[in-house]
Amino acid sequence: MRHAPIRVMAVCGTRPDAIKMAPVVRTLREDPAFSVRLVATGQHREMLDQVLRLFALTPDEDLNIMTPHQTLTEITLRTLEGLDRVMRAHPVDVVLAQGDTTTTFVAALCAFYHKTPFGHVEAGLRTYDLYHPFPEEMNRRLTAPIARFHFAPTERARQNLIQEHIPPEHIWVTGNTGIDAVLWVAQQPVVPRNPELQQALSHTGRVILLTTHRRENWGEPMRAIARAARKLLEQLDDLVLLAPMHRNPLVREALQSVLGDHPRALLTEPLDYDEFVHAMRKATLILTDSGGVQEEAPAFGKPILVLRHTTERPEGVEAGTAKLVGTETEVIYTESLRLLTDPEAYQQMAQAVNPYGDGKASQRIAQILKQAFG
């Protein structure tokens, strides 16, 4: 019988990391069986900090790795050096990180160097295309052989890992912790601070929520997406577009060049996560290249058109909550218009069952760790 708390180092670097790790960290910290050290790498500075504040989490260590225009190689090196310093100073029993960011891969590598078990939250997602998404697909593939605990969100993700010869006894289907997060946030009161969001929430007609940021969509693909959105606004007079823009100048230029002069295109700064959750609840239809949004939106019965040619989340496509439409203007326009003008097609997607979880993934992860280290 173990008497000392299980020492956990939880690592996050980006806004999606923080969103999906927050319920895990909160659950572990509420349990006296665990002692948790939260490490933020700062891979995405402002957006990361906002999420941590929302969940009332303060990092024990902040590596603050970001410098302007740094490369993936520089991010990797700075993160590895920083995590190595922390692990030398504060040995732990297990390291946890989420998803497919450079932070996650480097956390796994650093844990391996220190001969410390690594737990991969959201394990087993695959597109089987190394450059879509880039560098995320390679990050998660490299993480898998290192991990000792694979917390798969779905049975398909578990099967992906088994096909890669990961021992089945090291894999658990927990559901996705992002659902834990979004359901928690949806229960919290929010007063919208963003003026464009206020305008969208007060709009009596329909609202399209557009989010696009992926590296493979930079440039012409993103302009094609924006042209589809503009065509929809010109076709449907009651429609408003809400588009929170990533801070990357390439993303902003693409959206502003096509949509900037349209009176019903609400191009806005990135929304805080609690505001974004309420934007999803208000939206009639969501156009996105985000992986997390593909999981979260079905919790509110919102159809999703995925602005990508592949997805590591095929469960949503199979369940009918999402549809891949790529980045061609006419395809996006046609599929969006069909959902906005055909009530039967819309309801078929809106009423599909969310395949990504029930909001209890974090509790399952805590129980698995207690059994492993108890």
Image: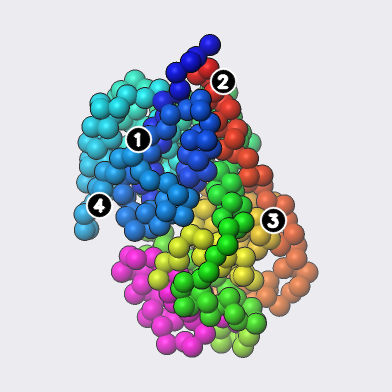
Q: Residue furthest right?
A: 344
Front position among marks 1 and 3? 1
**Image position, residue 33 (x, y; %):** 51, 25
Label drawn at residue 247: none
Q: Earlier in the sequence, mark 2 or mark 1?
A: 1
Magenta residues (range): 239-268
| Residue with the mark numbered 4 | 66
Mark 2 nearby-residue class (10 Å; few <14, some 14–19, many ≥20): few
Front position among marks 2 and 4? 2
Identify the element where label 1 is drawn.
helix
| Residue with the mark numbered 3 | 320
Whether residues under marks 2 and 4 lie with C-beta atoms below 8 angstroms apart, the answer is: no
- Is residue 324 placed above or below 357 in the rendered structure? below
Q: Nearer the viewer, residue 210 or 58?
A: 58
**Which amino acid, by three-letter code, is at mark 1?**
Ala
Question: On the picture, is 374 further left or further right than 145?
Answer: right
Whether residues under marks 4 and 3 lie with C-beta atoms below 8 angstroms apart, the answer is: no
| Residue with the mark numbered 2 | 371
| Residue with the mark numbered 1 | 107
**Image position, residue 140 (x, y; %):** 43, 39
Front position among marks 4 and 3? 4
Distance in Å between CA atoms under marks 1 and 3? 34 Å
Mark 1 nearby-residue class (10 Å; few <14, some 14–19, many ≥20): many
Distance in Å between CA atoms under marks 4 and 3? 39 Å
Front position among marks 2 and 1? 2
Is residue 277 in the magenta section? no
